[in-house]
Image: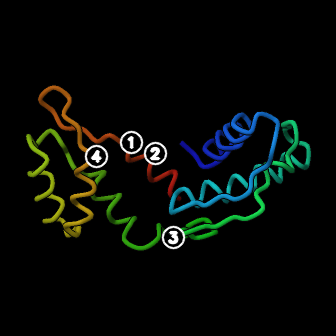
Amino acid sequence: HNMANAARDFVWTIDAELGGKGRVDGLVGHSLGGKVVLRYLQELKGMEQGKEAVDSVSRLVPRSTWILDSLPTTARGGLVGDTEAIIAQVAQVDLSGFAKQSEVLKHLEAKGIATPIAMWLCSSLVKEGEALDWKFDIAGCRELFQ
């Protein structure tokens, strides 16, 4: 779970999809995807300098890049906006105390998480036998976002 691995996976996926032909016309990254696209560009720069090789790095450099809702720098001194608080609150939720998504929703709202965000978070709950669990790895989310 880190941005470098996500970007490298992206490099190799795009290279494989192009099949040695054509080039990337453009990339758009939103939020976390924006950070992956930015790191993708850094990975390509490293490849051009000889760290790794693909058939042709220049064809993987997009003609146009758009980053939406993502800072082009590393978050310093905490995460951006309310995200840090939300990640911390979700990490502290002991799901063993809840039988239904609606109970988790009420708990998150009681902790001050806005209802639309709490609803979105609860859409990532899955039932494993009798227990609820998150579809995502909260520690991995925090690491990727930083």
Residue marked by disc 4: 124
**CA–CA distance in space, label 1 to label 2:** 5 Å
Q: Position of residue 14 (x, y in %)?
A: 69, 42
- Is 47 placed left or right of 130 in the picture? right
All told, the count of numbered labels is 4
- Is 5 placed left or right of 144 in the picture? right
Residue marked by disc 1: 137
Numbered tag placed on residue 109 in the rendering: none
* Marks 1 and 4, the one that precedes in the sequence: 4
* Residue 81 or residue 19, whichever sits in front: 19
Residue found at the very far front of the displayed protein: 22
* Residue 86 or residue 54, whichever sits in front: 54
Q: Nearer the viewer, mark 2 or mark 3?
A: 3
In which image quadrant can residue 74 be found? bottom right
In which image quadrant can residue 73 be found? bottom right
**CA–CA distance in space, label 2 to label 4:** 15 Å
Q: Given the image, on which type of amino acid does mark 1 rest?
A: Asp
Contact, CB < 8 Å: mark 1 with mark 2? yes
Residue marked by disc 3: 69
Q: Nearer the viewer, mark 2 or mark 4?
A: 4
User: Mark 2: which secondary structure?
Assistant: helix
Disc 4 crowd, CA 10 A, few/some/many (<14, 14-19, 20+):
few
